[in-house]
Image: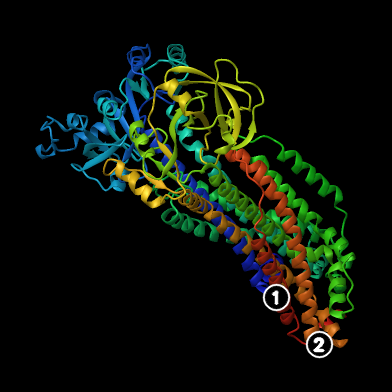
């Protein structure tokens, strides 16, 4: 009988007597678990889909000979195929083909029909199931004897299921590609099952890909199936000796990692941000459990008197937090799955970031994931309640029996603890990223936040000692009350400190990023009009004669040209974007946002280039260094003349003067034309004249700088839309904390209010006193939160962001937003205190006073 009575007295009874605070604690844990699980599920679903898509490109291959940025000569193929240990060698030409009328390029795989069947049997099975109709012959009247031959015949294409769905094409339909400014037509021979090819892609005969898309004599990849019993290491070593340095030997798994590398930092940071809500929920549990333990000190003393040991009391308190954690985790799992489903359908697999366009993965929830997030929610609840439970178990029974001791408590000096946490944060934040992720930065943020919470009681005591004096009785009593109970008064604002600081830091970081992006677009877009045809590696472009004819349009004063290509600085890293640009070599700052410049002379035989910050970080390149790479089959030695800020190319970019690029490659094609117009020119008329020069139906982008800037900021806002939601949830949990904390503390002071009423205080005066207390506590929480948020924003801007994306930005704060939110939080704290006081004064005043006797 004793055990059920103890459970009722120590666990279920208190939870029933305070259903509001119990519910808020459950909701705080649930929201944290829900957001963390939802973001994780969306990210994992996208990663799984990308992994399947990347793996499907290799079929049953064991190894792959990957080309550098420009491919490699097909004469290597026979030598690779005859290498001992190689059973099957399937050559591949990969093209980013521009589909007419569709923005995203189609990954076009040129494959040998016979070789690919040995490595991609799903291709053959799909084609074999396709009926051959004479009506499906092309205009040249040729017919295939079988569906398999037909699928790899000239001008036929097999589409992946996702490509057919997005392009709304079926067998027999015509698909048009833009090569340069010409149109090339192909007919759909069939649609591959999802298991055969996961990507937004298509398969054509390798000769067709080389001929139509101007890749004669070049291969992108050779997929290899090794003979039974052969050693992959020996085959790799033989291939390394045979092939040029720009070609690497990889496995399908490593290629999958490459496909995910670009989005990994974004996905990891978003998951960490989602777990911020759970972190805030832990502080909410800490504050509510501390105040609950404060109110129940006499209950614990009675329990001790009847024989309950302090270890048993500790176990009972932690059991109540386990119940809160279990309920919160269960609710959070349900909410998390629902949010993940809604997120995938509304924002997509990339959550608006643009990494996985066209990807529509299904949501699969694994039991292990549910178990991990459930344990995480329960663990946070237990950790949040551990310190209050230990403190409650240490309180002497005699002092706990005194009613007057309910809100008292000496502040223990925690200076060394705060200093230690601060030093640890400073040390950790200086560490390099782990596995390419800014994990030390996030650990430093957590350590700093804990230090702020630990220091808060001393900060409150110090501030109130120096508070201005005002001969107003409610004000004097409110200040004295907070100063006398600083240890517990600050418990009610600990969660608001954590949530508001994180919200403020994210707001500062996002505003800094957005403002820097805005300034960057204005810096790198100095012309009056831009026309772009194709991008890096895409099949569409302008020939030089057509681009030069645009310069003669009436109203055009001056033009400059860009050409995009790729270069490989290291075989084990992704290729960099090469931007061949008409530019003033002596004044690159006119079109580039220079962060540093070289002071040394250009070495003899070297060509000048300028690298982006991402390239500088990823390859440890500084201004004045020399780098080497291969371009159009030639070894190029380049002198880095400066490092420039870039928000477009996450894998890095190199700028080279266009005339130097033409001398090295002979490639005179153009992707972008920049137009400077006469003062009297009409932008719209000039734009129409430029369009008239292009062949009818040519896909192109023709925009003014203002339109490009608007599109860039819209893309930015989509990318960071999810962060605003996460910030809102964190602040909501913080409001839960201040509501539960202040109300618990006010309700514990009913006898004090009764005494004040006996001394002649009116309800209005008591309400004024409580409003002042709530405002002061809220203001202190906001001030400390703003300070902590500013420090955290510096870590996010200069450490986390730089290690994640290799972008620098200028500090900028949303003063209006922070001021408005600060005022709202202070007003909410005052209102909560007044409302709680009205409830506390609802009973008989005499009975409240008698509680002290």
Q: Quadrant of residue 675?
A: top left
User: How far apart are the two marked residues, 2 and 1, measured between alpha carbons?
Assistant: 18 Å
Residue 847: in sight, yes or no? yes
Residue 290: in sight, yes or no? no
Residue closest to the eye, 594 or 45: 594
Residue 411, image x and y in percent? 87, 59
Residue 474, above or below 465: below
Q: Residue at x 68, y 50 (%)?
A: 793
- Residue 762 disc label: 2
Residue 300, above or below 639: below
Residue closest to the eye, 326 or 133: 133
The local crowd at label 1, few if under 14, some if 14 to 19, many if 20 or more residues have their Cα within 10 Å, is some
Residue closest to the eye, 754 or 728: 728
**Which element is circle 1 on?**
helix
Image quadrant holding the C terminus, namely bottom right
Q: Which residue is mark 1?
A: 831
Image quadrant holding the N terminus, namely bottom right
Q: Viewed as shown, does residue 548 lie left or right of 174?
A: right
Mark 2 or 1, nearer chain start: 2
**Which element is circle 2 on?**
loop
Residue closest to the eye, 134 or 389: 134
Q: Residue at x 65, y 67 (%)?
A: 22
Q: Quadrant of residue 497?
A: bottom right
């Amino acid at each position: 009988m004793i055990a059920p009575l103890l459970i009722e007295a120590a666990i279920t009874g208190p939870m029933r007597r305070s259903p509001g605070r119990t519910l808020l604690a459950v909701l705080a844990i649930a929201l944290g678990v829900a957001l963390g699980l939802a973001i994780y599920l969306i990210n994992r679903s996208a990663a799984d889909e990308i992994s399947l898509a990347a793996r499907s490109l290799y079929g049953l291959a064991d190894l792959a000979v990957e080309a550098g940025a420009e491919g490699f000569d097909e004469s290597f193929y026979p030598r690779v195929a005859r290498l001992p240990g190689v059973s099957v060698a399937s050559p591949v030409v990969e093209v980013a083909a521009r589909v007419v009328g569709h923005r995203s390029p189609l990954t076009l795989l040129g494959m040998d029909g016979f070789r690919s069947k040995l490595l991609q049997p799903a291709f053959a099975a799909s084609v074999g199931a396709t009926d051959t109709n004479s009506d499906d012959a092309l205009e040249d009247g040729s017919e295939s004897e079988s569906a398999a031959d037909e699928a790899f015949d000239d001008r036929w294409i097999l589409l992946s299921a996702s490509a057919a769905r997005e392009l709304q094409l079926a067998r027999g339909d015509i698909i048009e590609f833009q090569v340069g400014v010409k149109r090339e037509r192909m007919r759909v021979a069939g649609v591959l099952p999802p298991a055969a090819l996961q990507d937004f892609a298509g398969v054509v005969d390798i000769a067709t890909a080389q001929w139509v898309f101007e890749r004669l004599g070049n291969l992108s990849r050779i997929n290899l199936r090794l003979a039974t019993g052969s050693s992959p290491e020996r085959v790799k070593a033989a291939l390394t000796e045979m092939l040029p340095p720009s070609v690497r030997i990889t496995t399908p798994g490593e290629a999958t990692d490459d496909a995910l590398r670009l989005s990994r930092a974004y996905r990891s940071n978003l998951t960490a941000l989602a777990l911020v809500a759970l972190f805030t929920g832990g502080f909410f549990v800490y504050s509510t459990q501390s105040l609950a333990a404060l109110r129940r000190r006499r209950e614990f003393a009675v329990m001790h008197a009847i024989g309950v040991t302090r270890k048993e009391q500790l176990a009972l308190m932690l059991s109540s937090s386990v119940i809160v954690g279990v309920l919160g985790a269960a609710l959070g799992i349900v909410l998390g799955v629902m949010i993940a489903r809604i997120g995938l359908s509304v924002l997509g697999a990339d959550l608006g970031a643009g990494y996985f366009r066209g990807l529509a993965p299904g949501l699969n929830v694994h039991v292990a994931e549910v178990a991990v997030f459930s344990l995480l929610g329960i663990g946070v609840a237990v950790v949040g309640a551990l310190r209050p439970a230990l403190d409650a178990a240490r309180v002497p029974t005699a002092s706990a029996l005194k009613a007057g001791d309910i809100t008292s408590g000496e502040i223990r000096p925690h200076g060394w603890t705060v200093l230690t946490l601060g030093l640890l944060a400073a040390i950790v934040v200086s560490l390099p990223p782990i596995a390419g992720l800014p994990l030390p930065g996030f650990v430093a943020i957590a350590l700093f936040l804990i230090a702020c919470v630990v220091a808060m009681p001393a900060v409150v005591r110090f501030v109130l000692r120096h508070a201005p004096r005002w001969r107003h009785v409610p004000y004097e009593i409110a200040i004295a009350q907070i100063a006398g109970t600083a240890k517990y008064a600050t418990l009610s604002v600990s969660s608001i400190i954590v949530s508001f600081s994180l919200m403020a830091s994210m707001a500062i970081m996002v505003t800094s990023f957005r403002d820097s992006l805005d300034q960057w677009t204005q810096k790198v877009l100095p012309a009056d009009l831009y026309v772009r045809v194709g991008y890096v590696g895409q099949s569409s472009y302008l020939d030089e004669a057509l681009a030069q004819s645009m310069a003669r349009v009436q109203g055009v004063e001056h033009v400059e040209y860009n050409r995009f290509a790729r270069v490989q600085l290291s075989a084990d890293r992704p290729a960099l974007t090469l931007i061949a640009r008409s530019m003033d070599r002596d004044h690159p700052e006119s079109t580039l946002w220079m962060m540093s410049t070289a002071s040394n002379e250009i070495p003899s035989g070297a060509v000048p280039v300028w690298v982006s910050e991402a390239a500088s970080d990823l390859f440890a390149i500084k201004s004045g260094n020399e780098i080497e790479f291969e371009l159009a089959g030639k070894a190029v030695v380049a002198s880095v003349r400066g490092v420039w800020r870039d928000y477009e190319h996450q894998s890095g970019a190199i700028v080279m003067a266009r005339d130097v690029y033409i001398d090295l490659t002979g490639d005179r094609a153009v992707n972008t034309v920049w137009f400077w117009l006469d003062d009297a020119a009409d932008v719209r008329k000039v734009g129409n004249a430029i369009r008239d020069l292009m062949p009818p139906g040519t896909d192109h982008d023709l925009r003014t700088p203002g339109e490009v800037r608007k599109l860039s900021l819209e893309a930015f806002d989509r990318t960071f839309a999810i962060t605003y939601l996460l910030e809102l949830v964190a602040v909501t949990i913080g409001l839960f904390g201040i509501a539960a904390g202040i109300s618990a503390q006010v309700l514990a002071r009913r006898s004090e209010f009764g005494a004040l009423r006996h001394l002649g205080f009116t309800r209005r005066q008591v309400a004024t006193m409580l409003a002042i207390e709530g405002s002061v506590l809220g203001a202190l929480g906001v001030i400390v939160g703003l300070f902590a948020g500013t420090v955290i924003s510096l870590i996010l801007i200069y450490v986390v962001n730089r290690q994640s994306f290799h972008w620098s930005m200028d500090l900028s704060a949303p003063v209006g937003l922070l001021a408005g939110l600060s005022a709202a939080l202070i007003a909410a704290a005052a209102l909560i205190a007044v409302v709680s006081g009205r409830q506390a004064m609802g009973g008989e005043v005499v009975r409240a006073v008698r509680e002290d006797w």
